[in-house]
Amino acid sequence: MKSIATLGSHCSLQVLKGAKDEGLKTLLVCEKKRERLYKRFPFIDDLIMVDSFKEVLEQRCQSFLEQNNAVLIPHGTLIAQMSSDEIESIRTPVFGNKWILRWESDREMKERLMREAGLPMPEPVAEPGKIERLSIVKRHGAAGGKGYFMVASEDDYNIKRDQLISEGIISKDETLYIQEYVAGVLAYLTFFYSPLKGELEFYGVDQRHESDIEGLSRIPAEQQLKSSRVPSFNVIGNSPLVLRESLLDEVYAMGEKFVDAAKRIVAPGMNGPFCIEGVYDENAKFTSFEFSARIVAGSNIYMDGSPYYSLLFDETMSMGKRIAREIRLASESNQMDKITT
């Protein structure tokens, strides 16, 4: 019997609950400081206690996962805490395409894949001296929005960057990515591509709540102007969103183009869950500024199933359960090589 393993963070609860619902054994790589939290949940069969998540690379953890016939489910914490080289060195089978996680972590590679897919994108800004309009400065990797900041000029960039360095939020030698800011309704579009069926499924939409940029809307402009604080885009939580039905055809088209582009340039392609992240403007035109090549935390709001998955499945289906079902079906049909790397 297959086991499902993941790191104790981000979306591990829905991943392991979904695995248990599918009759699979569940393993959690758990930092000691979070043991008390995860012991509350009876669907977790075994905790692998570590001081740091990087210990999953060590022989002790790798051997335990191998003995339990485990498949590792990657999520944002894996990308945030390990380099691409470290992720690619993991011997445990990883669900999806572990090679594409490098493309998610590197801004230039990310931009290349999105352009290959023909996704509408904001223009990148090559350097601070070329900032001509409102732009957003981002860090590489899965930083969860922490350390992002908005700028309108090179001077604005230098002042805010220096302040964040002095506060220890970003490092002095950190490479930052600048992108024109696009205003609109935030929409994070989550999909699942099944290589077993050769089909794309649209899972759902969420919005992310970021602190303390959202709190500024409750502060009068007079007080905002007196503050020198650089607002944070740190993601605190998520809420559900349902799109106008007339937008769905374009949503599926974008997802399919992304899957096709990934197959062409980063084999074996975009297998499993992924998210195209962007905004809708006043004309309902979508502009994508990011993608995540694995399960995203926004799927946590749909642990009992999303509105769109209720159209595809006659049962509750979280993304965690959908992943587990793909693994169970692949295992039963001897096709694990199609869904893991």
Image (tube, rainbow, N blue to C red):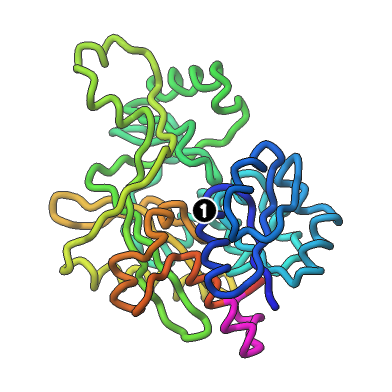
Q: Is residue 121 above or below residue 34?
A: below
Q: Main secondary structure of the magenta part?
A: helix
* Residue placed furthest toward the left: 283
Residue depicted at x 48% and y 41%: 144
Residue depicted at x 42% and y 82%: 199
* Residue placed furthest toward the top: 226
Q: In the depicted view, which residue is nearer to us: 3 or 264? A: 3
Total number of numbered discs in the rendering: 1
Q: Which quadrant would the N terminus be assigned to in this image?
A: bottom right
Residue 330 among magenta residues: yes
Which residue lies under the disc numbered 1? 11
Q: Secondary structure at mark 1?
A: loop
Horizontal side of 304 relative to 112 (left or right) equals: left
Snapshot quadrant of residue 268 = bottom right
Give amino acid for label 1: Cys
Q: Which quadrant would the C terminus be assigned to in this image?
A: bottom right
Magenta segment = 327-339
Horizontal side of 210 relative to 21 (left or right) equals: left
Horizontal side of 286 relative to 302 (left or right) equals: left
Residue 222 among magenta residues: no
The answer to whether one can see residue 232 in this image is: yes
On the image, the x and y values in percent for residue 59 come to: 86, 56
* Residue placed furthest toward the bottom: 333
Horizontal side of 275 relative to 324 (left or right) equals: left
Q: Is residue 281 above or below residue 257?
A: above
